[in-house]
Image: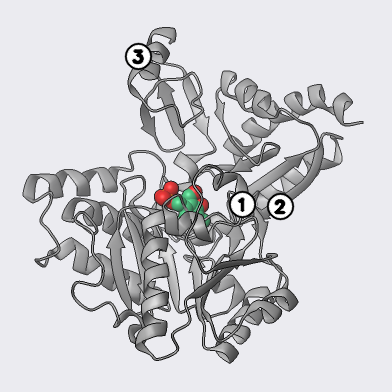
Amino acid sequence: MEDYIKRAEKVLTPNYRRQPVLLVRGSGSRLWDSAGKEYLDFGAGIASSNLGHSHPKVVAAIKDQADKLIHVSNLYYTEPQLELAELLVKNSALDQVFFCNSGTEANEAALKLARKYSRDKGKGGYEIISARNSFHGRTFGGLSATGQDKFWKGFEPLLPGFKFVDFGNLEQLKALVSKDTCAVLLEVVQGEGGVWPAPPGYLAGVRKICDENGALLMLDEVQTGMGRLGKLFGYEWAGVQPDVITLAKALGNGVPIGAMLARKDVAEVLQPGTHASTFGGNPLATAAALATLSVILQEKLPARAEKVGRYFAEKLDQLKESHAAVKEIRAVGLMLAAELKVAKCERVIDRMREQGFILNLTQGNVLRFLPALIIEEKEIDRMLSALDRELKVLDPEAK
Ligand SMILES: Cc1ncc(COP(=O)(O)O)c(C=O)c1O
């Protein structure tokens, strides 16, 4: 492994804190490293491989499409792109789709759309309000909308016109929104920020404030979409109709693809030449995403995520009762977190990996569980009994 690390240090930019493991193969919720060691994956490539690794229907769709046509530009029509857009529209509250390659690009498209819509419709305001502790990506637009200044350091000045409110606080939003606001951009559950679900009634309240002020409601479903929260899209829980949503991560089950979906009268301001992406929605990526979405729908994976997620959350609640080291459990569907009371939680991730469990850590002390939606209850039990042992070691520090 040292040899790989040395080679990587030479040629890869040092912007990731990688774990010392070389992964070579995956199937379902399992991963294998170069030494043949098996892992149960509770990260799914950060909420991306919702069907599990190398799902046979996605693999077949990629192989079939690669044989036929990998890429042409958006100057032409292709079948998988059109079929994917039709399926997304049919299963969402939105009318039209712009395809891109990542979550930050989907948000970038939404931010540009909001400004253009405001100008074209004669309002003219260009301010965007998002939430503190949010995460919307790393391009200058996504970064400017991200309400965590640790990500801004060294990159200022950011774009003008971005303002922040506390997530869940309608009074602050009411006070900040003005004729200059063109959109409000929010996650349904703040993921990277530590798994903080929107409080009940919050998004409906935001919808009302947006309507009263002629601002678009744009929901970043990059992490929460595609069944993870127990519905195909997270906004379905809140019973609101957003004007724009953004998707990526699990849309292609690991194949890079992003999408921005919008109401027709909003989307129509994106006339030819206003926005574009060379690879956005190319045949290979959309064939993978079409297979992914078809499996999610056919196998009713959102309902499964809700059921298994409830089981997982109950088990985590029990774990909290027996460990001083656990501060709080937060969960919606298969997006779950155990916030710990101790520092330096990377050691938990390392110890769990050594025992064959891949976990994710966010905000330094929040264990985030984002398994494939096909994870089984007995696999959850196996991971939690290992975690139980690790937490026992940490408990004395928390007392
Ligand atoms: C809610 C949210 N939005 C946007 C992004 C950025 O997505 P990407 O890394 O694909 O650019 C992420 C990534 O974690 C995310 O969680």
Residue 300: x percent and y percent?
Answer: 45, 61
Q: How many marks?
A: 3
Residue 7 bears which disc, if any? 3
Name the colour scheme.
Answer: one colour
Q: Counting other residues with Cα less than 10 Å from the Cα at mark 3, is it few (<14), some (14-19), or many (20 or more)?
A: few
Q: Which mark sits nearer the N-terminus, 2 or 3?
A: 3
Q: CA distance from mark 2 to mark 1?
A: 20 Å
Which residue is labeled 1 in the image?
Answer: 148
Look at the image and tell me whether residue 66 can be seen. Answer: yes
Q: Nearer the viewer, mark 2 or mark 3?
A: 3
Q: CA distance from mark 2 to mark 3?
A: 39 Å
Residue 363: x percent and y percent?
Answer: 65, 41
Question: Residue drawn 61% across and 50% down?
Answer: 149
State which quarter of the image contains the N terminus. top left
Q: Which mark sits nearer the N-terminus, 2 or 1?
A: 1
Residue 163: x percent and y percent?
Answer: 59, 67
Q: Secondary structure at mark 1?
A: loop
Q: Nearer the viewer, mark 2 or mark 1?
A: 1
Q: Nearer the viewer, mark 1 or mark 3?
A: 1
Residue 330 bears which disc, if any? 2
- Disc 1 under 8 Å from ligand 1? The reply is no
**In the displayed structure, does residue 237 sit left or right of residue 16?**
right
Residue 72: x percent and y percent?
Answer: 10, 56
Q: CA distance from mark 1 to mark 3?
A: 33 Å
Question: Residue drawn 61% across and 44% down?
Answer: 150
